[in-house]
Image: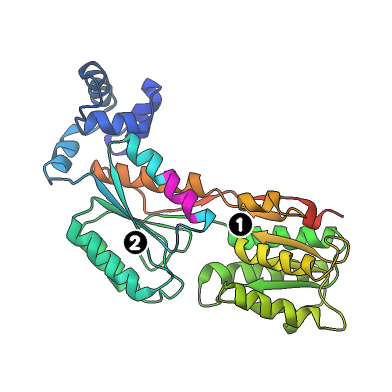
Amino acid sequence: MAKTTITINDIARELNVAPSTVSRALNNSNKISEKTKDLIRDKAAELGYDLNMVASSLSRKQTNIIGVMVPSVNRHFFSQVVSGIEELAYDAGYRIIIAQTNELAEREKDILTLFNSTRVDGIIACLSLETSDVTRFSKILKNGIPLVLIDRVSYELDCPKIVVDNHEGAFQAVSHLVRSGCKRIAHLGGPMGCPVFKERSKGYLDAMQKAGLPIHAKYHLSTDLSTRDVQEAMKVWMSMPEPPDGIFTSDSHTGLVATKIATESGLRVPEEISFVAFGDDPAHEYIVPSLSSIEVPGNEMGRSAMQLILEQCLGESIDVQTIIKPIQLIIRSSSFR
């Protein structure tokens, strides 16, 4: 095996230990015994891992701090992402700084400035809904700071990305509603300026077309993801002579709000109207009726992003790739007819 192909994952597999343990050992952490450090260093040398690369990395006076930027930690998906990052970071001897953009591009800019001045060893970020110009992220890369984008990404940036197949998830959700007998399926989308919601919208349209169902503009609405916007959309739909009998929402929060509005209005769910939301939340299982959803592996996405940061912090060259994590349709009472 060539030197350039050896990573801390390879060493971890050979020794049946966690990659974070290998990272700690190579970083000379005092949380790892000298015996374990020697074992890991010996195995690294045996496999052809470039220990000089590690020494060079350490000489850059790393802070062992990773900057994590998400829109809001109040949303279940983002809290799961942060949890996955933190678990692996802690095991590897790193600390994280968590910052929220609140979906504001200006705040995103300020946070990146803070991370740069704090001399973080790497940055994991999910773009805000307002982000269209990624120049500030390009500058981060030019400064040699490892960057991994997660969920909402920009393909203009030459860095690793962790995503899910948004089109496929939406397609599965709408196809399930079709199989459940829905004929008038509406889509409650997110801001169309965000590629993630564009992909989910396309998945909805393609599933409707494949099923041979009519696509009406009045059934296809975008929102800013706020409760107010969902209330307005539901008011419009429920006042129609032929209201939707199935609704796919591009966001877990909007799914919860829409389902609650329907039940409080006296509609029988799923008999009269069914719901599926993109993104899962613990509340989906406990509301009545429970809400069907597309489960997105936030914790796993966070761990994968942190793993890529760890490898770069050790000086490893990594493929600039897009890693697509699997989604899963969870069928609950809101769509089970």
Q: Main secondary structure of the magenta part?
A: helix
Looking at this view, is 282 or 34 the one in front?
Answer: 282
Residue visible at 80% across and 78% down in the picture: 238
Residue located beneath label 2 in the image: 158
Task: Give the labeled residue for mark 1.
Answer: 279
Q: Could you tell me if residue 317 is visible in this image?
A: no
116, 172: nearer the viewer:
116
Q: Would you identify the image quadrant in which residue 93 lies?
A: top left
Point out the tag, 2 or 1, that comes first from the N-terminus: 2
Residue 11 is marked as: none
Q: Is residue 121 above or below residue 218?
A: above
Q: CA distance from mark 2 to mark 1?
A: 27 Å
Q: Position of residue 324 (x, y in %)?
A: 52, 52
Q: Quadrant of the C terminus?
A: bottom right
Specify start and end residues of the magenta stretch as a single range.
Answer: 78-84
Q: Is residue 34 above or below residue 68?
A: above
Of the pair 119 and 158, the residue shown nearer to us: 119
**Where residue 236 sits in the image (x, y, percent)?**
74, 83
Residue 137: x %, y % from top left? 30, 66
Mark 1 residue element = loop
Mark whose residue sits in front, 2 or 1: 1
Residue 91 point in image, percent of width and height: 34, 34
Rendered view: 121 above or below 30: below
Q: Secondary structure at mark 2?
A: loop
**Residue type (three-letter) at the residue carrying disc 2:** Asp
Identify the residue shown where x is 30% and y is 29%: 22
